[in-house]
Amino acid sequence: MRRTIVDIAKEANVSVTTVSLVLNDKAKSMPESTITRIKDIAKKYNYKPNHMAVGLVTKKSKTIGLIVPDITNNFFSELAKSVESYCNLHGYTLILSNSNNDSKKERLSVSLLMDRGIDGLLIAFSQTESMEKQSDFVKLLNKLDIPLVALDSYLEGLTCPGVSVHHSLGGYIATKHLIDLGHKKIACITGPKSFYTAERRLKGYFRALEEHEIPSQDNLVKEGNYSYQSGYDATVELLKNDITAIFVSNDLMAYGAYRAIQEQGKTIPDDISIVGFDDLIFSEILTVPLTTIRQQISELGNKAWDLLYQGLSDGTPTKEYLQLEPKLIIRKSTKNILKEGNDA
Amino acid sequence: MRRTIVDIAKEANVSVTTVSLVLNDKAKSMPESTITRIKDIAKKYNYKPNHMAVGLVTKKSKTIGLIVPDITNNFFSELAKSVESYCNLHGYTLILSNSNNDSKKERLSVSLLMDRGIDGLLIAFSQTESMEKQSDFVKLLNKLDIPLVALDSYLEGLTCPGVSVHHSLGGYIATKHLIDLGHKKIACITGPKSFYTAERRLKGYFRALEEHEIPSQDNLVKEGNYSYQSGYDATVELLKNDITAIFVSNDLMAYGAYRAIQEQGKTIPDDISIVGFDDLIFSEILTVPLTTIRQQISELGNKAWDLLYQGLSDGTPTKEYLQLEPKLIIRKSTKNILKEGNDA
């Protein structure tokens, strides 16, 4: 049977707090004999300090919660790995929870993690519900009495700090790259317009067109849901128009676009140039490696941890909202149509 | 300030145990006045039962640990998602830890998770160290006083239950499929031979050759490390031989093989047939969709949970080792060379 701190306290005839302080080397004004007695009993039962018990005394569990919308999306698994490495570095353990893009499960995860006595929480939101319902959730989050950091996206009304890639700048850079290569008939496959990330990236696309006096056209913007299939479907529709390039709001949808383009006997980049967003590992190993916007995942994890750690350390978290600069990764899926030959 | 169960116990002038029992509705022979007093105080502080505190009394934290070697490998992220869904279904929370294929970090994760007071542990081993060091780790694991389940692989000497896909059967089915299509010059790119999964899959390859009286050749077996690049490198070497097919021990290495084959101006499946192992989502969306061995991830997660839950429920876990049947998914990367036309 596993012995708990309660068993040791009973046997040593001291309080749970005393045992916890002794075993965590925080007993400063304790008789040496008591310390020895407690340590001997702990040794006898091969007992190791249990963070649950320590938590009751120090009110710290040394545990951080991270909620992501889809752990099977490589962007989020890479991000979780990065955040975890920073947690571990500072002696914290990461509890990962997957909301499955389900706002109900997301709220449940918050409750479960709070019950588990986490010291801090990071959330990459699922954002699949109406603004009205969202506002209730925001109220709840603003009331949490532990440091909270919004990751990758942000909800209106939140008072916590946050960090994401500068999504609209990413959309702008991607579109501007196509414009610089001579494209004027540039379509866009956006993610769900209700998603913070998608809405921002689309905004960047419009800004680049506007700055270069290229009129935007409603029929050249198709909404997908960030899945492979939706990228395929949107591309089939877009190819009915006279276009030379597509900015696709994530890499997975870009892979779908590849297939639709190839099925119609067209080639990338000779007929259609493509720029994606994410830089998943697979983008490099496609038959035609994908030009895309890289989200600096390690930097994102690092900054998120910094913001959280600030809150953990002094209890007065900053309200900062950081937007990291995205990077254009030029590969083989974009063609310069001002001159002969591939790419710039 | 966040109030703990200790604060409430003090204010109500009762023990922590009493508060825990009342707030978890397990106080059967308690005066009604005490119950009301405790609940009122809890309400005043907006206190919710904290699993850490409950854990001290019930010795259950309702938390399960899962250690995986690489959360960014889609096989493991899909598996984590599956296991988590079963945990949640039974009111447990999953703590995920990533060992990064580092056996030191794997041991540290075991300690950290045990400290966190988990009720049960699932490990998908990293297996990157010598058998000798492994045996120390096995001794430690066999001494754990909570239910443990080995996932995806197994270490010699373990006494806990386990579940994995039948790796050697998978290797056999993959190779037999190629033989049935008329191939005799079949190479193999294996994972690290020290890995349980790789060693078993390779065994299946040899068995299929032997059963069909095809002599195996040392120069047709190349060892990779399950990465894309190693699949590419191994294929470059293998193509120096007169071969018509390759069984590749995971999909990621198969993607590397694709690139090497294409770079040499050869085509899949006309010149070289390929069978992979894993069935990652990307295998379906390659230019030439990959024929591969599917690991039934959801079933794997389900069985692992069943084995663990048995241990959690009655404290006497089975020592069962389950091997699930893998499934051949035939797509477009294999060609029947007995007759004209593609595939069987």
Image: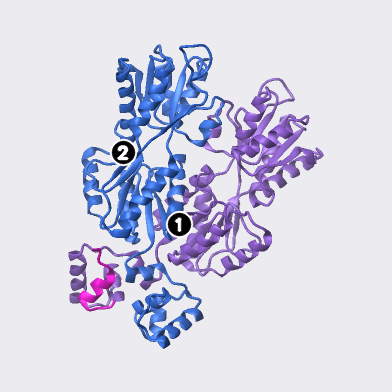
Chain colours: A purple, B blue
Instruction: Give the magenta range.
Output: A1-15
- Residue picked out by circle 1: B88
Q: How many marks?
A: 2
Q: Residue A46, located in which quarter of the rendered image?
A: bottom left
**Residue A17, percent across and down?**
31, 75
**B334, above or below B199, in the image:** above
**Residue A255, percent across and down?**
60, 33
User: Left or right of A65: which side holds B56?
Assistant: left
The numbered dot on residue B76 is: none
**B255, above or below A220, in the image:** above
Q: CA distance from mark 2 to mark 1?
A: 31 Å
User: Left or right of A65: which side holds A323?
Assistant: right
Q: Hey, what amino acid is under mark 1? A: Asn
Q: Residue at x 80, y 37 (%)?
A: A214
The numbered dot on residue B128 is: 2
Q: Hey, what amino acid is under mark 2? A: Thr
Q: Residues within 10 Å of mark 2 (few under 14, many from 20)?
A: some
Q: Chain of mark 2?
A: B
Q: Chain of mark 1?
A: B
Is residue A4 one of those drawn in magenta?
yes
